[in-house]
Amino acid sequence: MKITFIASNPSILEIREKPKPASELMPEWYKNMLPTQSPLKLNPQFNITAKKCLPLIDGLTAGYIVTLWADIFVSYDENNFPIIETAVSDLITEAWPLAISSTFEIPEGFQLPVFKYFHGWIPKTPKGYSCLITHPHGYQNNPFWTLTGVIDTDTLTTSANAPFVLRKNFRGLIPKGTPMFQILPFKREKWDANYEARTVLESYNEFEKLKTTITGSYGRYIRSKKEFK
């Protein structure tokens, strides 16, 4: 499958950072994490850290990340209303009217208004595919939180401006290149929930199979490799 990122105008393609595979923007806390405990324990199974957790890695590297294309500075007016300023001439953010967002539930520790981020990229996917737009995985301590939405990117014709809220009382610079949101393409399909129970023997056999290797059983027996280039 192929996803194409279309710039809204030629200058965006020339000047702004392009959306990147999330694997190229791993958070610093993950890169700095040691792969094993120190000091080492006798049982190798308990030596590894979350650095080796494949579900975590798959979450951090899934899809693509759009970054902030210019520095922005956050301050407040005389009514303690947040203001976002930048040195560039193109519009980079805009606040939603409070009448629209005042009853919108936002994460604890963050504040209204909701801002729109004008990034200028139009993601295009094959027919039948949409994209989940969400806060970049692994960047929980950013001074903002991007709100989640799903966009039918096979029929989208304009840039979808990502909404975000600022952390309460945050003042200061958010630098160019900060990951703003993550894009995860998926195929639209109808799903029907079904509910079953395993037998005790089935559960025992599956558990015993996974225990035959002290470490790496998930990667060996369960995980399928994902690629985003």
Image (spheres, grey):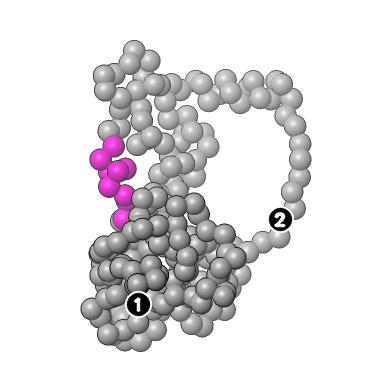
Instruction: Please report whichever mark, 2 or 1, sits nearer to the chain's N-terminal start.
Output: 1
- Tell me the tag on residue 122: none
The foreground one among 220 and 15 is 15
The image quadrant of residue 3 is bottom left
For label 1, count other residues whose C-alpha is less than 10 Å away and answer few (under 14), some (14-19) or many (20+).
many
- Tell me the tag on residue 191: 2
Q: Secondary structure at mark 1?
A: loop
Task: State whether residue 226 appears in this view.
Answer: no
Which residue is rendered at x = 35% and y = 27% of the image?
48
Query: At label 1, which amino acid type do we have?
Result: Ile
Which residue is rendered at x = 46% and y = 79% of the image?
159
Q: Secondary structure at mark 2?
A: loop
- Tell me the tag on residue 92: 1
For this orientation, the residue located farthest to the left is 87
For this orientation, the residue located farthest to the top is 42
Decide: is 97 above or below 192: below
Q: Nearer the viewer, mark 2 or mark 1?
A: 1
| Residue 28 highlighted magenta (yes or no) | yes
Decide: is 135 above or below 125: above
Q: Which residues are magenta?
A: 25-33
Location of residue 107 in the rendering, given as x and y in whole percent from the top left corner = 50, 54
Query: At label 2, which amino acid type do we have?
Result: Trp
User: Which quarter of the image is occupied by the C terminus?
Assistant: bottom left
For this orientation, the residue located farthest to the front is 78
Which residue is rendered at x = 25% and y = 40% of the image?
32
